[in-house]
């Protein structure tokens, strides 16, 4: 078994330096203002301090983000984005400790940590309002605490693990995905009942605020029986996403496998990805059976869930699997380093080779991320994509840095400016978020009613009762433009579309 333990000096100092480096990167590439979609929705909840106990409400993140809104500088939505940068950086620091804990040496551990730091999905979510960096910081901490307990047997680590998991449930229910791996450690090491009891009690203390919120919701909303469970486990502001859970399909398995590999390749481009595969193969030799199985279970627990969770943003739910994959990257780099050490190279040559490897590890992903939007704009993609409005629209989903990105604010201000008095604005959830944020936080055009669409377009149009109707966009994938053209004159008023009725509305939706 590789040498591990508290006696190895410099772990915490190196972890701190990597944390600071990550924080500088994420702050420098942070989105400055309100965002599209879930980001804008979470920003609004953070500003208003909306705390609920449902699965999709993420009350721990909302509470922390609400505290950030009181910072005395910058755009209030930009302050909420800062939460992701802080916890993204903390994830990087704890990940480095985990890499050293499994026995990976300094240079390979640093290279592996850098690989996750600039990986596409992680970086993207570290610079905008999202719950995932907070969740991953807690999951990484749990993975490290579990391994520290396994190596030392100290009860304190087990109790801290229980507390971390309990608190983590208020951030995101994904924290349970590491459960099988942690149970493996309990199975492989002799444990004492007092330690497990302490972990259980700490877990209950950690989850207590979430249970209090849930009890309040039950009373306020009048929930009963199975409705309570559905609210706690599969609900998001009244929307039940239970049907998307455990939706594994053998028919879709080839497509799902291709999608998984494509996203994995996008995260760890080139040498990092190759080292991850190599590290998987070499992990038992480098770390021993128990640790190798532990890392594999961390990966599989997260991966199996993401394969069976069929939602539009499923790519996000691969994130917990990228943490153990980064451990494999560390093993792969370590194997390469050991091979180089066996060569009769001079020290200067060896260090030059390591510097070249580090440069390639960082530059290859950056080049791929910059090229991806151009390829997608030319129709080269493996899945349907969408461009949001604004000059940076094609880069929003594909280029992680968000420095100076204010397209959502510009769009929302323009849409509310051109809307006639009393307008009903029909918008999909992605485009409605910045508009609703400006209305409710900055009190811009409260006379405009924003309504989600367009699954119930006929009902939405009828309920407008003679009020002006505006479409947020004319994307035929989202809005039934062809049908609307039969009923209305569609007049473009940049950046939205005014519907002018030319004959009575047809009752049936095509």
Image: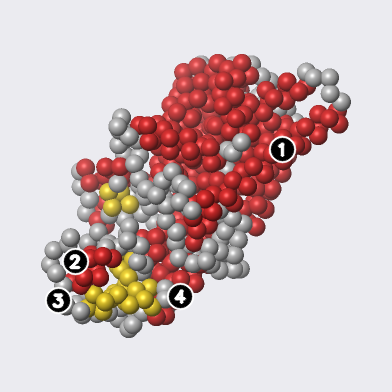
Label 4, residues with CA under 10 Å away: few <14, some 14-19, many ≥20: some
Q: Is residue 294 above or below residue 484?
A: above
Secondary structure state at the residue bearing disc 1: helix
Above or below, comparing residue 458 to residue 420 in the picture: above
Q: Do the residues under discs 4 and 1 have CB atoms within 8 angstroms?
A: no
Q: Nearer the viewer, residue 451 or 165?
A: 451
Quarter of the image that includes the N terminus: top right
Q: How far is mark 1 from mark 3, CA to CA? A: 66 Å
The front one of 195 and 350 is 350
Question: Label 3: which residue?
Answer: 504
**Residue 358 in sight in this render:** yes
The residue that disc 4 covers is 413
Numbered circles on residues, count: 4
Q: Secondary structure at mark 3?
A: loop
Element at label 4: helix
Mark 2 neighbour class, 10 Å CA radius: few under 14, some 14 to 19, many 20 or more? few
Q: Kindly indicate the quadrant of the structure image that contains residue 421.
A: bottom left
Within-10-Å neighbours for mark 1: few <14, some 14–19, many 20+? many
Residue 344: % across, % down: 84, 19
Which numbered disc flags the more N-terminal residue, 2 or 1?
Answer: 1
The quadrant of the rendering that contains the C terminus is bottom left
* Residue 336 position by quadrant: top right
């Amino acid at each position: 078994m590789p040498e591990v333990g508290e006696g190895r000096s410099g772990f915490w100092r190196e972890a701190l330096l990597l944390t600071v480096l990550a924080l500088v990167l994420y702050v420098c590439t942070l989105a400055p203002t309100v965002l599209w979609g879930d980001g804008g929705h979470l920003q609004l909840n953070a500003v208003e301090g909306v705390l609920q106990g449902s699965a999709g409400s993420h009350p721990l993140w909302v509470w922390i983000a609400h505290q950030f809104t009181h910072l005395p500088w910058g755009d209030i939505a930009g302050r909420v984005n800062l939460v992701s940068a802080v916890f993204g950086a903390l994830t990087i620091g704890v990940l480095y400790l985990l890499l050293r804990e499994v026995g990976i040496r300094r240079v390979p551990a640093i290279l592996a940590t850098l690989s996750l730091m600039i990986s596409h999905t992680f970086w993207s979510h570290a610079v905008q309002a999202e719950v995932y960096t907070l969740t991953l910081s807690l999951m990484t901490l749990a993975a490290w605490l579990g391994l520290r307990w396994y190596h030392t047997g100290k009860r304190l680590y087990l109790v801290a693990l229980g507390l971390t998991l309990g608190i983590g449930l208020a951030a995101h229910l994904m924290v349970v995905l590491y459960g099988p791996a942690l149970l493996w450690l309990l199975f492989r090491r002799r444990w004492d009942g007092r330690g497990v009891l302490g972990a259980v009690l700490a877990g209950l203390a950690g989850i207590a605020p979430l249970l209090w919120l849930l009890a309040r919701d039950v009373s306020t909303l009048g929930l009963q029986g199975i409705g309570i469970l559905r609210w706690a486990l599969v609900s998001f502001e009244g929307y039940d996403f239970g049907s998307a859970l455990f939706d594994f399909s053998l028919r879709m398995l080839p497509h799902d496998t291709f999608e998984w590999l494509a996203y994995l390749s996008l995260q760890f481009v080139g040498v990092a990805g190759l080292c991850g595969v190599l590290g998987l193969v070499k992990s038992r030799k480098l770390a021993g059976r128990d640790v190798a199985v532990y890392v594999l279970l961390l990966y599989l627990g997260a991966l199996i869930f993401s394969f069976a969770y069929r939602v539009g943003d499923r790519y996000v739910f691969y994130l917990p699997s990228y943490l153990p994959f980064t451990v494999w990257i560390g093993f792969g780099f370590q194997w390469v380093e050991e091979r180089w050490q066996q060569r009769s190279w001079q020290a200067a040559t060896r260090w030059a080779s390591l510097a070249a490897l580090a440069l390639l590890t960082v530059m290859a992903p950056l080049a791929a991320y910059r090229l991806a939007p151009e390829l997608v704009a030319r129709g080269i993609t493996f899945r349907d994509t969408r461009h949001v409005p604004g000059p940076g629209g094609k880069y929003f989903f594909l280029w992680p840095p968000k420095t100076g990105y204010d397209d959502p604010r510009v769009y929302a201000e323009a849409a509310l400016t051109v809307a006639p008095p009393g307008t009903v604005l029909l918008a999909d959830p992605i485009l409605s978020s910045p508009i609703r944020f400006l209305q409710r936080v900055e009190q811009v055009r409260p006379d405009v009613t924003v309504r989600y669409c367009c699954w119930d377009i006929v009902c939405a149009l009828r309920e407008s009762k003679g009020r002006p109707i505006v479409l947020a966009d004319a994307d035929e994938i989202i809005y039934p433009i062809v049908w609307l053209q039969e009923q209305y004159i569609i007049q473009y008023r940049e950046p939205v579309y005014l519907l002018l009725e030319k004959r009575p509305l047809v009752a049936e939706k095509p």
